Amino acid sequence: MPENKLARFLAIVRLADRLLRDAGIREPPVTTDLIHRVHPELSVRPAALGSVGSSLKIEGGPDGRSIPAIYVNERHSIPRQRFGIAHEYGHYLLHHRRVLEGEPPAGRAAEQEADLFAGSLLAPAWMLDLLAPAIDYRPDAKTELDRLTLKLASKFNVSRTCMARALFQLHHLRKALVQAP
């Protein structure tokens, strides 16, 4: 990973960690109500969004001020709604200026950053590190990895996909720390 990409990755992970620490959250599952505690101006609203999972919009308030709102698809599963909320919260924090100017954050990089933030907020590496043994990615260990993923996804109230990504990141983080001078 190029140095500037690694720095951005670490900055996003640290932002999620700082929010959890400031909210006093020390164990799973991470509740999304921390968003309102930290940013009371940001509301979360259920909506019928078709196939879209979530959306961040800026609306005009009665006094003319801009009011940010996260809309989440009420038809999706709770873990998927939670990820959508955290994803849009990531856009709000990471791409705030563009959002307030009415420009949705565009591009694959912005979506990847919001996904990284959401995963880091809902399944932080430091919590997983306490609960997950050494992760074996060999093909013959797939069944055990699937069991661990399912167990932790349930404990963290996230999807299996979110947990699989979080475990993969934890695995690589552990490897990087072992190889660090």
Image (cartoon, helix red, strand yellow):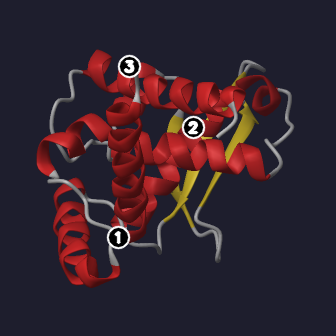
Query: Residue 3, percent across and down?
Result: 67, 27
From the viewer's perspective, tell me whether residue 42 is left or right of residue 16: right
Residue at 59 percent of width and 69 percent of height = 48
Assign the C terminus to one quadrant of the image: top left
**Which of the 4 quarters of the picture holds residue 56?**
top right
Give how far apart the Cα atoms at labels 1 and 2 are: 20 Å
Residue in the picture at 32% in, 35% down: 178
Distance (Cα) linking label 1 and label 3: 25 Å
Residue 137 image point, x, y percent: 33, 68
- Image quarter in which the N terminus is found: top right
Residue 160, numbered label: 1
Q: Position of residue 140 (x, y in %)?
A: 26, 83
**Number of numbered markers:** 3
Q: Can residue 154 be seen in this view?
A: yes
Specify the amino acid type for callout 3.
Arg
Q: Residue at x 73, y 43 (%)?
A: 110
Question: Closer to the camera, 17 or 129?
Answer: 129
Q: Name the residue under label 3.
A: 18
Q: In which quarter of the image is residue 41?
A: top right
Which sits earlier in the primary sequence, circle 1 or circle 2? 2
Answer few, some or many: residues within 10 Å of disc 1's Cα (few below 14, many 20 plus, some between 14 and 19): some
Query: Does the rendering let one see residue 93?
Result: no
Instruction: Give the mark nearer the N terminus: 1 vs 3.
Output: 3
Kindly identify which residue carries mark 2. Answer: 90
